[in-house]
Structures are given as structure tokens and as C-alpha cells.
Amino acid sequence: MLQVNDLHVSVEGNEILKGLTLTIKAGEVHAIMGPNGAGKSTLSAVIAGKDGYEVTQGTITFEGKDVLEMEIEERAQAGLLLGFQYPVEIPGVKNIYLLKSALNAQRVARGEGEMPAPEFMKLVKEKLGYMKMDASFLQRAVNEGFSGGEKKRNEILQMLVLQPKLAMLDEIDSGLDIDAMKIVADGVNSLRAEDRAILLVTHYQRLLDYIVPDKVHVLVDGRIVKTGDAELAKQLEANGYEGIEESVA
Amino acid sequence: MASEEMEQLVRREYKDGFVTDIESDTLPPGLDENTIAFISNKKGEPEWMLEWRLDAYRQWLKMEAPSWAHLDYPPIDYQSISYFSAPKRPEDRPQSLDEVDPKLLETYEKLGIPLHERAALAGVAVDAVFDSVSVATTFKKQLGEAGVIFCSISEAIRDYPELIKQYLGTVVPVADNYFAALNSAVFTDGSFVFVPEGVTCPMELSTYFRINAANTGQFERTLIICESRAQVSYLEGCTAPMRDENQLHAAVVELVALDDAYIKYSTVQNWYPGDENGVGGIYNFVTKRGDCRGDRSRISWTQVETGSAITWKYPSCVLRGKDSIGEFYSVAVTNGRQQADTGTKMIHIGEGTRSYIVAKGISAGRSDQSYRGLVKIGPRAKGARNFTQCDSLLIGDKCGAHTFPYQEIGNSTATIEHEATTSKIGEDQLFYCQSRGISEEDAVSMIVNGFCKDVFQELPMEFAVEAEALLNVTLEGAVG
């Protein structure tokens, strides 16, 4: 589904990713772990198309299409969706309006036409219940005055409504207490499907107790230095990243 | 009113002229006492009105154009302006839409302006395309039954001289400022509204229905009076971009609210801003002031300013009556090379007076925008309160936003709150929306409309919808 090949990325002249290669197949859940500054968030940002990242070498393809040639919104329309570590506030824009605009923009781009309002409301209410969110969330401005946990739940709510093919979640566990983490993890787990892949970017192993990945990649200094299964994450928890770096060296 | 209703009204047959007293003469450029006498004569005005104009003119001669505004424009040569020009003759106007700038038509399309109105707005010489006359006639009957007077200021001077004598120039004195003095001397058109005691005007009043205002709006004079317990909502302007031969516009608007009266004045202004270098755009120097003369009276200004090359405009409230309320809700958008210096003045004189200011400025392109607001609390204004919120949004990195809040507090029992923010339209906000599949243009419009929401919700519903569309068109291509 997603193929990243020998990816080199620079930010303001500093090379952050130094030849990263990664393959994600439909139905899989991948976790990317690594120390701070290793380039974890850079990877998902580049895939989503954020400005300020220069790809100096390598390719990213998604279902055979060259991702780097696509506009930001085209990537989302193709089914690539990024859940933010720090979702931004958009004053005056209702949460439900953003959701509806996003869903319809994606549907129209795929030639499906806009979703009728009653059907949309039914869908959103169902997903809200799943995330244990009150309906008043829909009428509030996007992320404005939301607590850290509410913002993260809102990100997952968007995923549940938009149903991407590849969901990328950047540090979705940061700042969550254990109850909120369970709700978020339940939401993510409900996204697991044969035709969908999930890419988790996380610093801590904790999240992976709730969302058990098929593959764990250790990212150090811009490269994936080790790949394993869920056990690898536990090793990391026990020995830290330094142990891995040494074993690789 | 519903747009279908509107459509029906405009399709009615032509009945009789609304302003037919303007003949085909045009004064050569230049301004002296003879010019003023000519205008006054053309309008069939009584002697006292001519004297009033001449007094204004003589005071104007002694005044100087204000230079304190944060605006940059070449000096205006007042002798090069023609102060009385008849509407263009049909043979001089475009004969069909094919002769009109396609770009203008494209904008009408985007704004959703009905086909039959587009021609009129573009100045096409088609008979009764937009038959404002019959609309006005229909309305007049309904208004007349309620006792409301709504007519052109010229008619009012002829037909209701006592009201004019009693109120004209009492809110904005003839020598109030340079542009108001000029307007008082040479105004040629405008509206007059009188709502008698206890009457709520049965409909929203709009100059939009008088299409001829599009061609003669250079020096407009508007006077609205609400007697005790009377109410009116007045809409000025039009979202369609209006072109005008006249570069200088200097309007005066006076509002008078007596005890328990409520005047709501909404403006959508979209004069031609000039080309990408700002050439040919309208200079808009407007004096708008409301006088809350009566106890518990309330005056509310709502404006959406998107046009003009230069905007100089401070709709204000004089809060004289006890417990009277002044409100100012503003969205000003500048793009390209536009410059706007706009804001409000809230003058608290009476006890327990309250004012509320929400100003939203959006700058894009190479434009420059200033908010200038004065809150003045007089010594007798015990317990007066003001709340000001003033937010600027920048799009791109070549535009400017400035805030000049002035406060003069003459009373220790007053409460003043001021909040101000300046933010750049977040790359992060844009990325967030786009990464959800929303196009950049739709994302900008979503973010900007969200920013303006507090003001838009003060507009009459139909106006609010138009204003949103207008904002999108104005900011098209502002990002990227």
C-alpha cells in the first residue's frame, strides 16, 4: 500500500531522514519508535505533505501513485490521513463544519458526491458515541479550548468519520491519562481492517499495550535501524534506545 | 425578504420615474459658490437649504484635509472634480454584457448575482433590467401605511422641510470635519428615513433597491430618525463590485434615536479597489455618526468593508441618553494595494451608557489596514461600560495591520475592557484543513469566515450569506 524508498529529507539544510525505507501493506499496523529528534514526526509530516520539508532523494508511493507529486489535499483524498500530535485551533469554525467539509471534499474528489445531511449526522453521532464524546463537541470551534485529551479524541473522531486507507497517528498518546488512552486506543483498534493500514508514531511503548502492532520499527538518526514485532517494543522499554544503537553499531 | 419575492418584484413593469429630475446636463469640473447654487437649484431646494450649503462651503474653505490617518494617497484636486453629473446616456454605456469586462462578470457569477441584475450593475443600457422603480413604489405603499417615510434626501428637503431643518446637521455638524463639510456643501443624493413614535418599520430598508444610487453616490447624504420606541433596520450597499467614474466618495450618514428607539445600520461596501497596482480605485471618506439622544436608545453599526482603494471611515455613537447603547461590529478586508483606516468612536455622555466594539481586520496581498478607535467617557457618564475586541488576521507576509486604540476616561466609575489579537493565518491551520482533504482556497475561506463569525452573525441573514461569498471572492488568490 505504502512504499517509502531511500527517503532523504532536509529541514532548513539539515538532513533529518537519511535513507529511510519502509513498506506497509493493507491490513497491517506499524509502529515507528525512536528517541527524540530521530525524525519520527518528519516521516509522517512528509507523507502528508507539510511545507518546509525538502525531499532530496528517494520516493514515496501510495497504491502505485507518486505521493510527492500530489497536493496536500489530494493525498487526503487518496486516503492518506494524518492525526496530529498538536491539533491546531480554528476559532469560529464549528467542529461539525470541518468534519462535513472534509468528508464531502474527499467524497467529491472520489466521484461519490456529497453525503446527504441526515446520513452524515447519523454517522457522526455513532462515531461520537464510540469516542465517548458529547454532542456539544460538534458545535464547538475546532479544538478551541479543548483539553489535550479532547483534542486527541477529536483527531480519532475525524479518522472514524473519514475512514482513510492509511491512518498515520503522530504521538497520539502524548498527554493522555490512562482512561483517555484507552478510549483513543479503542477508537484506533476499531479502524483495523483488512483493507486499511495504520502507522503509529510514538515515543513510548505504553500505547502499544493497547494497540498491538504487527511491526515495530526503530528509527535512529534518520534511518530504520531495526524492525521486529510487538516484542521489540517491549525490549525497547526495558533497555532503552541506546541498547539498540549499540547493537546496531 | 426572500429572494424569490425580490425576483418577483423586480420583474414587475415599469411604472414611473423615481429620480427623474436629473436632466442631461453635467457641470464642468470646478467648485465655487456658483456650483453649489447650481446643485441646489437643480434639486429645487428652498433658499434656506442653499444658505446651509453655502455656510458649509465657506467653512470648508478654511479647513484642511486630515493627515493623521495611516493612509498614503496623492493630494486630491477638488477643482478637477465635476460636482454634478447626470447619469450616462444610454448610447454611451455598454450595449450588452458582451461589452463588459469578463472579469467583472465572472465575479458576479461567483457572488450568485441574478442574471438580470448583472447587466444593471455593470452599467449596461438595457431598459428596466432591474426595475428598482416599481420595487420602490410597492414598498412605499406598505411603508406609508405604517407611517414610515423612506425617500431620497432631495425629496425630503422639498416635502418634509420641518424634519430636515430640525435634524439635518445636528449629528454631524456642517464643519465637523473636512469631508463632512464638503459633503454638506455639495451632496446630491442619499436617503431619508423617518420612523414615527412607537412604530417598528415593517421591513428592512435598503438602498440596494434604488439602482440609480450606483451612479450618483459620490456625495451621499443619509438621515435616519427614529422617534420614541421606534425601530428600523437599514441596509446599505451591495455585495456586487460597483464601478464608478467618480474616484472620490465622501458620504455623511446621520442617525438619531430618541427614547427607547433602536436603529440597526448594516453596510456591505464593495467599491472598486483599483487594479493590482491600486490604480483607478475609489477613495472612500465617510462620516457616519449615530446620536443616542433618548434614554435607553440603541444604535448598532455593522459593516463589512471589502472595497475601495482608500477607506477612511469611523461609524460612531454619541451616547447621550441615560442607559443608551452603542454597538460597532466590523469586518474590514483589504487585498492587493488597498488601504483602510477604519474604526469607531464611542462617546459616553449619559449615565449607565454601554458600548460594545468588535472589529475584525483581514489584510492580504500588499494591503495596509488600521483599526482606530476612541472610547471617551465623560464626567457625567456614571457607571459607563465599554468592551472592545479588536482582532487582526494577516494573510501572507507583505501586508500590514495596525491598531490605534484611544481611551479618554473622565469618570472613575467607568469599566473599560480592551482585547486585541493579531495573528497570521496559520500555515498550521491551512495545513490542518488541507490534510483533511479540503482545498487551500476552501480552507482559507473557512478560516477567515470563522474569524469573522462574531460580526457576520450581527448581519441580517441574507446579507450574511452574501457577505461570506463576498469575502471568498475578495480573498481569492490571496494565499499561495
Image: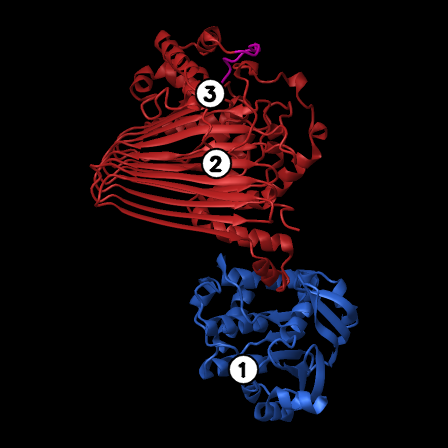
Chain colours: A blue, B red
A37 to the left or right of B297: right
Q: What segment is highlighted magenta in the picture?
A: B19-30
At label 3, which amino acid type do we have? Asp
**For the residues marked 2 and 3, what is the alpha-carbon distance in whole angstroms?**
25 Å
Residue B23 colored magenta?
yes
Residue identified by numbered label 2: B341
Give left or right: position of B300 versus B94: left
Q: What is the crowding at mark 2: few (fewer than 14 residues within 10 Å), some, or many (at least 20)? A: many
Image position, residue B250 (x, y; %): 48, 24
Reply above or below: B108 against B155.
Answer: below
Q: Amino acid at mark 1?
A: Ala
* SS type, badge 1: helix
The residue shown at (21%, 37%) is B379
Instruction: Kindly indicate whether the residue at mark 3 contacts the one at mark 2 (C-beta within 8 angstroms).
Output: no
Rendering coords of residue A198 (x, y %): 65, 79
Residue displayed at 60% across by 49% down? B396
Res. B269 visible in picture: no
Q: CA distance from mark 3 to mark 1?
A: 68 Å
In terms of secondary structure, what is the magenta stretch mainly? loop
**A135 on left or right of B298:** right
In the image, residue B275 sits, relative to residue B49, either above or below, namely: below
Q: Picture quarter containing residue B104?
A: top right
Q: Is residue B437 above or below residue B295?
A: below
